[in-house]
Amino acid sequence: MPPTPENYDHAAFAERYPLLATIDGPSDLKTLELEQLEQLAEEIRQTIIEVASKNGGHLASPLGAVELAIALHYVYDFSQDFLIWDVGHQAHAHKILTGRRDRIHTLRRKTGLSGYPSRSESPYDVFGTGHASTSISAALGMAVAAAYKKGDERRAVAVIGDGAMTGGMAFEGLSNAGHLKKNVLVILNDNEMSISRNTGALAAYLSRMITGGMYNRAKGDIKTFMERTMSKHLFEKARRVEHQIKGMFIPGGFFEELGIRYFGPVDGNSLPTLIECFQNLKDIRKPLLFHCVTTKGKGYPYAEEDPLKYHGVGPYDIQTGEKPAAAHTAGKEAEAASFTEGFASALIEAAEKDERIIAITAAMATGTGLDKFEKRFPDRFFDVGICEQHAVTFAAGLATQGLRPVAAIYSTFLQRGYDQLIHDVCLQNLPVVFAMDRGGLVGEDSPTQQGVFDLSYLRAIPNLVIMAPRDNVDLRLGLHWALKQDGPVALRYARDRAPLIGASEGRDVTRGEILRQGDDAYFLAVGPAVRSCLLAAEGLEELGLSVGVADARFIKPLDTDLLDSIAHLPMITVEENTLEGGFGSAVLEYFESQDRLQDLRIKRVGVPDRFLPHATRAEQLEEVGLAVPGLFEIVRQLLVDRSPQRIK
């Protein structure tokens, strides 16, 4: 039975986690002693480990931020102030503490809690997140809005990781925050740097001095004294010298120059330190940056030892840290590699033969499979950080000099580099290959991660070729073909296994392909949807219906010869993309340009015009009619009106 609020056993939970079971909201924290808060942190941490072991999802990041969430809710009142978690995959403890404890076991399950902050879940989730580097801008907007509407100084707190801080948007927000001087606290959760015990103690001590009222009052008194005793000229000169020295010797001098007071670094897993610092910072009402260092994966040895492996996980055995033994599956389905694995192998194969090939990722080396490329060609691999805009234009610059860059970026994240796609790559018709992983429905991750818009937003761009391989043979051949083109090519593939579809020898990936002949209708599909269409066609045959299956392969330009060859029969276009402006729309536009729409019967199947909630990929496909039963029923109904006598 899938986890739901209805089958939650509070008594059993309370027996295992007696203190956490008493925390119904943030106000309950404020009555606890420090020793109890420490116990609470351990109970929350064990809850996160247990839930992730069953549901999968992010693990190392939320484990490292448990004390941070407790300290924030202990010191501040976020029913009044604002709290924004950048990306949000580290906010599990925040969810547990803000009235969602009894539903945390439904995390990432259909109708359950989202793996990311969501405004529809709780008033404590004041801003929905899922993409990096947005929190500072959102926090500043909220602080400005509060001052504008009520004239108050409600505090806005943005928790951002060191990875997300690499994104240019974060610095745009910091720059504007320093200029506007609003009551914004940016918490830099740095989980990549380890601090030795001595250094950590010294850093915590210095931070207590800096954040204490005495330091801030003393600084104000010294400034007043200087202004009174120095001439204006000497005072300004002294201030310039102070700023120069600060930039050279004081940690965080860069932020100070932006007009943002810097505090830290401190131990972000020390509750006493965090609570004391936040209590001191409460009285400083100006832009602040608080730098804390946390241990990614803290409290779970396997995650601490390998935080990359345990950043995002599937279900696992808590005792061993490993996935449970997979059920044996007969046939080729069990042997099929993922599209990501197929891409990684194909790119390495191509790079062995062509030293011009360069691989680029935006902080997703493992997710895109490029970690394997990095090991083989370390000098030809570039991880540019969470900077998709830069990644695209960086690739364009490489292409101008005769290199063959391959930018492997998730579909949902390529959206962030759309202007650069148009202006820097396609306008100049540069030979950049975009490997768009996670194209289509992505399962348990929130709507922020769905890759269902790319065919629509890419199709409008001149000079760009868009191909959707149906399996890894297609992906390998398509990548090799794309690397020989003189202009940009986008290869779009799913977060899924890629079983072999059709013969592997002699494929011509430069055009579409009819995989099954039909006399009554044709599925016209792209990507892995081709396989679902083949299975649906087999089932329809049992009803006496002869339905063909054509793999269009290209979304742009369309293989119009293929379209013309099947246009005499009803066509069902099938795509894992929003129907607005997608592949089916492209087919309609082609026939409209030929003034032939009145002679055709076309049904489009795809993702409806709404954001899909998280669920398994299979559940999502079923929900939108892209699973085999849905395709079967759509075609059955379509053909009943045409030839009901043939339906059994």
Image (cartoon, rainbow, N blue to C red):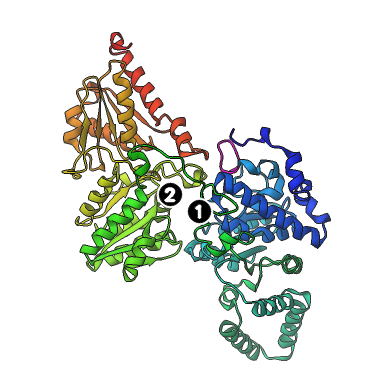
* Up/down of 150 relative to 497, above or below: below
Q: Position of residue 467 (x, y in %)?
A: 27, 45
User: In which quadrant is the C terminus drawn?
Assistant: top left
Q: Position of residue 602 (x, y in %)?
A: 29, 25
Q: Indicate the quadrant where residue 628 lies.
A: top left
Q: Indicate the quadrant where residue 41 lies.
A: bottom right
* Up/down of 162 relative to 5, above or below: below
Q: Position of residue 449 (x, y in %)?
A: 47, 47
Residue sitting at 27 percent across and 33 percent down? Answer: 587
Q: Position of residue 70 (x, y in %)?
A: 71, 57
Q: Residues within 10 Å of mark 2 (few under 14, many from 20)?
A: many
Q: Nearer the viewer, residue 620 or 641?
A: 620
Q: Is residue 604 left or right of residue 86?
A: left
* Up/down of 50 relative to 179, above or below: above
Residue position for label 2: 412
**Which stretch is magenta?**
107-115
Q: Is residue 117 visible?
A: no
Amino acid at pointer 2: Thr
Please, what secondary structure does the residue beneath circle 1 have?
Answer: loop
Please, what secondary structure does the residue beneath circle 2 have?
Answer: helix
Residue position for label 1: 131
Q: Determine whether label 1 and label 2 are within 8 Å by CB.
A: yes
Q: Is residue 392 left or right of residue 3?
A: left
Amino acid at pointer 1: His
Magenta stretch, main secondary structure, is loop
Q: Nearer the viewer, residue 441 or 373?
A: 373
Q: Indicate the quadrant where residue 258 lies.
A: bottom right
Q: Is residue 358 left or right of residue 285?
A: left
Q: Which badge, 1 or 2, is on the more N-terminal residue?
A: 1
User: In which quadrant is the N terminus drawn?
Assistant: top right
